[in-house]
Image (cartoon, helix red, strand yellow):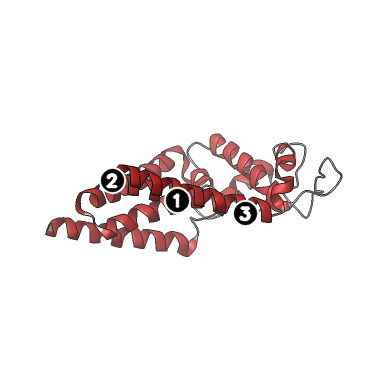
Amino acid sequence: MGAITFLFLTFALGLFFINNMENKKAAIAIFISIFIGGFTVLYMNIKTDKRWQTLFNTIPIALQTEKYKYWLDRKKYKKPLLPNGKPINDSNYLRPAQLKVASELFLENPLGVGFGRRAYKHALLKKYGEGHGHPHSGLLNLAIGVGIIGTIFWILFSLSLIYFGYKRYIKYHSIPSLILFFIVIGFNSRSFIDMTFQNHNLVMFMMLAGLLSFASLVEYEKA
């Protein structure tokens, strides 16, 4: 999953080359090289990580969340088996199963259940009377906690930082703006597949975003 996030950042980096080099042909060539490098990393990950071998057989089982309850409590419910009779890999199974359940919980609680790092667990207890863990998605956990309106505000906030960083870098070649652009994209893209809105992760992101935004404004005022 980290390789997928790497591809997002690689693509964004390539766009900067195209926008900031006078020789567009050279910029496109560099962009293609960067993108090929990103896909090479992904390919190597697929070849070396054994979880990929059973992933596509596991997903259909994981999405049958009513039939198989292993995602709800791994100590209480039996681990599902693959078509070949072998037990599923927890990582392959839990992510899609909990992402599906978390999406359902979000839609069932449009106003949210209350902001917190255990929002997913509270929503599970509310619906099933049991459950633990997290949805392997910081964004979905946030959405379950703050609801549709809060989620929209977060998305707009993030997009405004991305746009701000992009415009300041293009116009003034501000290094803090460039760093801000990549940090916001990196944090949010990672939040799809990891619990980024947790404790110091969120604190450090907000602090860095604030400092970089301020540094970008100071350079803008000087210009």
> Can residue 134 be spotted in the picture?
no
Residue in the foreground of this view, choosing between 58 and 194 = 58
| Residue 117: x %, y % from top left | 53, 55
Q: Nearer the viewer, mark 1 or mark 2?
A: 2
Percent from the top left, x then y, of residue 217? 20, 56
Q: Residue at the spot x=41%, y=62% of the render? A: 203
Three-letter amino acid code of the residue under disc 2: Asn
**C-alpha gap between disc 1 and disc 3:** 17 Å
- For residue 45, the mark is 3
Query: Dot 1 lies on which element?
Result: helix
Q: What's under tag 1, amino acid-wise?
A: Ile
Q: Is residue 129 left or right of residue 168?
A: right
Question: Taking the image as drawn, is residue 143 in sight?
Answer: yes
The tag on residue 34 is 1
Pointer 3 with pointer 2, Cβ within 8 A: no
Checking the image for residue 23, the label placed there is 2
The answer to whether residue 223 is above or below residue 86 is below
Q: Please report whichever mark, 1 or 3, sits nearer to the chain's N-terminal start.
A: 1
Q: CA distance from mark 1 to mark 2?
A: 17 Å
Label 3 to label 2: alpha-carbon separation: 33 Å
The earlier-in-sequence mark between 1 and 2 is: 2
Instruction: Please name the amino acid that badge 3 sits on.
Output: Asn
Q: Nearer the viewer, mark 3 or mark 2?
A: 2
Mark nearer the N terminus (3 vs 2): 2
